[in-house]
Image (cartoon, rainbow, N blue to C red):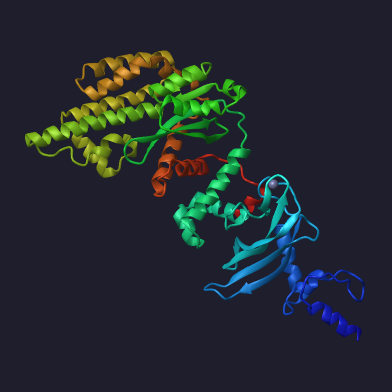
Amino acid sequence: MRRRRRKGAREGVGGREEAHPVDGRVSWELKRQPAYAPRSHRMQLKTILNRLEKHKSFVYDSMTLDESGEEPRLLIRIKPRRGSRPVCSGCGKRGPGNGHGEEREFEYLPLWGLGVFFVYWMRRVNCRRCGVRVEQVPWGVGKHRQTRKYQWYLAKWAQRLSWQVVADVFGTSWQSVSAAVRMAVEWGLNHREMTGITAIGIDEIAWRKGHRYVTLVYQINEECKRLLYVGENRSEESLRGFFRGLSEEVKGGIRFVCSDMWQPYLKVIGEQIGQAVHVLDRFHIMTHFSKAVDEVRASESRDLKRSGTAPVLKHTRWCLLKRPENLTESQSVRLRELVQLNLRTVRAYLLKEDFQWFWEYRSPTVAMRFLDEWCGKVMRSRLEPMKRVARMLRHHQPLIRNWFVARGTISGGVVEGFNNKAKLTTKKAYGFRELKTLEIALYHQLGNLPEPEFTHRFR
Ligand SMILES: [Zn+2]
């Protein structure tokens, strides 16, 4: 008799709580379980889940394998802990419940090749401040289909693979991956520390056709290198946006700033951080040289074609732009052949290579004497693009001299390294029609943003 009653208590379904007929314990939870799952197994899985993801006001109810759809799924039902009151999604405060809304599924980290979903009946809150609202649940983010943890998981993968590949691999959409990355970036930006910033680099990259630019500001301290800011265009306003976001203390702590010779940047740097040593960056200066050599080559190539001379400049572009030590065997041969010819392009190239010596000097005084001589040589060369570079260098002499002052403090190749990575990020992402999306991708790749503790498991 006693035995039958116990069995009945276990198999019953329904909500009312009942004291256990034998020892008086509450058996509400037991009664809700489907009869085929042995109790010990249920407890083990629940224990694991409770270790991984425990929420104070909720309990895991049951787990089932749903085989009704195309792919089997693991469904984990969640219910509110007894007596707990729902949290308002408007203001984040608890309020009295007001019945149930819809049942929602939240995608969790996949397991054993199965999709895993939390299933939960959303409650409504009768909030004093916001009126009747749907409750906010701790594992979810707004209306997103994914749980917060799954979003972090996707975001982690999106750092290594393109968003589309991540979407394909995990059977979700590009939009879901993008939303996950956005969540991660927003969290990171809200939690990052803006301390220890004594050296910054300012750079611009083109994105989309039609000369649209973004201004990027990096921290380039030896011990911490990261993207700090993304601004639309490359105007004075684009850069002022960065300084507006800084406290006076952080602004006053900046001792070195690297940038290009772009006039709007020069102006804002002067007005915002006059105390900092302003360095014209080696990478940016050499970019001007490459552009000039390329211009000479293109125009001479056109002239030769017009006059019917053999096309000696064909396929020489990379020989002329790369540093000699980076050339392939056949490019070296090609370059040696070229140098035999008295071409404008070759003279421009030799002037550019000659200038590389400038960076090797230890003493700024000697270096500046070299610069002066070099500029004189170029001004007599009748190579207009090169003369433009020389004029620009002469004009900015004090800032170029600062390169020698700052040497050793800021690592030289950082701005170039960031520039390459930023370009790669821009190129990889076909979906970046919108500036906001590009901004998020750049922060995600280069921002070195903090993450919550639990994401360390996802590596
Ligand atoms: Zn509220």
Question: In the figure, 402 relative to 242: above or below?
Answer: above
Q: Position of residue 29 (x, y in %)?
A: 79, 69
Quarter-of-image position of residue 78: bottom right
Q: Is residue 272 left or right of residue 214?
A: right
Question: In the figure, 44 relative to 125: above or below?
Answer: below
Q: Position of residue 37 (x, y in %)?
A: 72, 77
Question: Relative to the observer, which residue lies in front, 390 or 351?
Answer: 390
Question: Could one spot residue 459 in this view of the protein?
Answer: no
Question: Could one spot residue 128 in this view of the protein?
Answer: yes
Quadrant placement of the N terminus: bottom right
The residue sitting at 19% across, 36% down in the picture is: 337
Question: Relative to the observer, which residue lies in front, 86 or 284?
Answer: 86
Q: How many badges with numbers are in the image?
A: 0
Question: In the figure, 266 relative to 224: above or below?
Answer: above
Q: Is residue 30 left or right of residue 280?
A: right
Quarter-of-image position of residue 113: bottom right
Q: Is residue 279 left or right of residue 452?
A: left
The residue sitting at 69% across, 56% down in the picture is: 124
Quarter-of-image position of residue 298: top left
Residue extending furthest toward the bottom = 1
Question: Relative to the observer, which residue lies in front, 362 or 19?
Answer: 19
The residue sitting at 53% across, 50% down in the picture is: 179
Q: Position of residue 55 (x, y in %)?
A: 73, 56
Q: Position of residue 430 (x, y in %)?
A: 39, 49
